[in-house]
Image (cartoon, coloured by chain):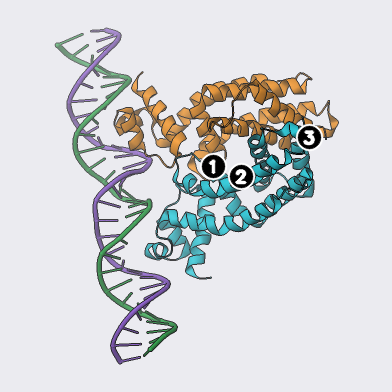
Chain colours: A orange, B cyan, C purple, D green
DNA sequence: CACTTGGTATACCGATCGGTATAATACCCC
DNA sequence: GGGGTATTATACCGATCGGTATACCAAGTG
């Protein structure tokens, strides 16, 4: 691994463990076995380092979500596909997902939030679009896309959060439970 | 208002807006119109300031939750009462609730998380106990108390989060929706 | 009056913050 | 071998970090 990759890896670990504001650039450089100017050569700034992290890890995730979010008339199937993408990505990149969760709920004016907001809202809109399309087939859902999207993503993140803490197994059983739990409440 | 109260108030605003790590003690003192030694006279440390904030705001909240979490054989009624407490408290103390949400999802080793963890887990256990008791009447719930508690609190927080961003109205209609959305998924 | 007590300010501490100017390497292409 | 280009380290910047030693001052108490 070259230094650039090592820096990214150590930065991710540190940010996920103690938060963007809780970690100094110096510390990341030391953990990566380089000095600060090396880090600044590659990323320009602390914010640039976080942006690079988000770009690298979030892009493939967003693509998978976009693919799973294509609504073809079967809402349960679409939701299951979406949950499968979320669960499998969390299992693939647990450390990054930890950081992502913290940033989703970080204060609105924090530096970390500003960097992550754009790309995360993309995902949100993709999920929202699913419910917007599905409203053609389920009239009683109309006007509640935003709430549904937020609730569905929230439910998935709750399970992933429990899994990250070692409280549950993130398997197909739980996935079906999440989809069912959410779905039954929709039609009411 | 005396200086102690002013400091607490300004600290809450700052922490909620930019996070515990993102705000310096100096800045809080300046916003309160005092100097650092005054702040340290009352709270001893930055962590002490956060602890004082959590104690003051969380104690009445926890008491209300404890009262609402008494299960008397009617699960829908208990959940509705719980949601009512959460919603009304969020409306009463929106700035504090913002800070609380951020801390719930903050990285595990961050200073802010360590301070807030104890008191927040109290609430979590209260809600979990509701489902544990309800499992006597609804056998199919058995063994899933933790997941149910996390999901229910998560659903409420999602709504409150949307409300804090001005996306939804936090009224009785939404409250019923949350309870129903959650409830229908339980019995499956 | 003398004396304590709680609250506040001036001025300072060492450490760390994010960031950089400069220069020395190491490598590749000519 | 020469000339770039990319990568790295030494050493430093001003600012801010959390925290404190000291002393002043107002209010209450004997």
Mark positioned earlier in the residue sequence (2 or 3): 2
Tell me the SS state at disc 3.
helix
Name the residue tied to disc 3.
Answer: B184
* Chain under callout 1: A
Task: Identify the disc placed on residue B125.
Answer: 2
**Where is residue A147 shown, x and y percent of the image?**
72, 38
The CA distance from mark 1 to mark 3 is 31 Å
Residue appearing at x 54%, y 26% in the figure? A58
**Where is residue A21 shown, x and y percent of the image?**
44, 42
- Mark 2 and mark 3, same subunit? yes
- Mark 1 and mark 2, same subunit? no
* Chain under callout 3: B
The CA distance from mark 2 to mark 3 is 22 Å
Q: Quadrant of residue B154?
A: top right
Name the residue tied to disc 1.
Answer: A106
Tell me the SS state at disc 2.
helix
């Amino acid at each position: 691994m070259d230094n650039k990759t090592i820096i990214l890896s150590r930065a991710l670990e540190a940010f996920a463990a103690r938060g963007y504001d809780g970690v100094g650039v110096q510390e990341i450089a030391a953990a990566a076995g380089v000095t600060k100017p090396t880090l600044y050569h590659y990323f320009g700034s602390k914010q640039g380092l976080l942006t690079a992290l988000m770009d690298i890890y979030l892009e493939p995730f967003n693509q998978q979500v976009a693919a799973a979010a294509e609504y073809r008339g079967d809402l349960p199937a679409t939701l299951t596909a979406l949950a499968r993408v979320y669960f499998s990505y969390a299992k693939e990149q647990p450390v990054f997902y930890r950081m992502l969760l913290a940033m989703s709920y970080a204060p609105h004016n924090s530096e970390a939030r500003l960097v992550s907001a754009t790309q995360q809202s993309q995902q949100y809109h993709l999920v929202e679009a699913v419910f917007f399309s599905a409203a053609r087939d389920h009239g009683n859902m109309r006007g509640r896309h935003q709430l549904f999207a937020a609730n569905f993503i929230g439910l998935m993140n709750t399970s992933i959060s429990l899994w990250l803490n070692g409280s549950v197994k993130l398997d197909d059983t739980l996935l079906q439970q999440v989809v069912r739990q959410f779905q039954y409440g929709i039609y009411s």
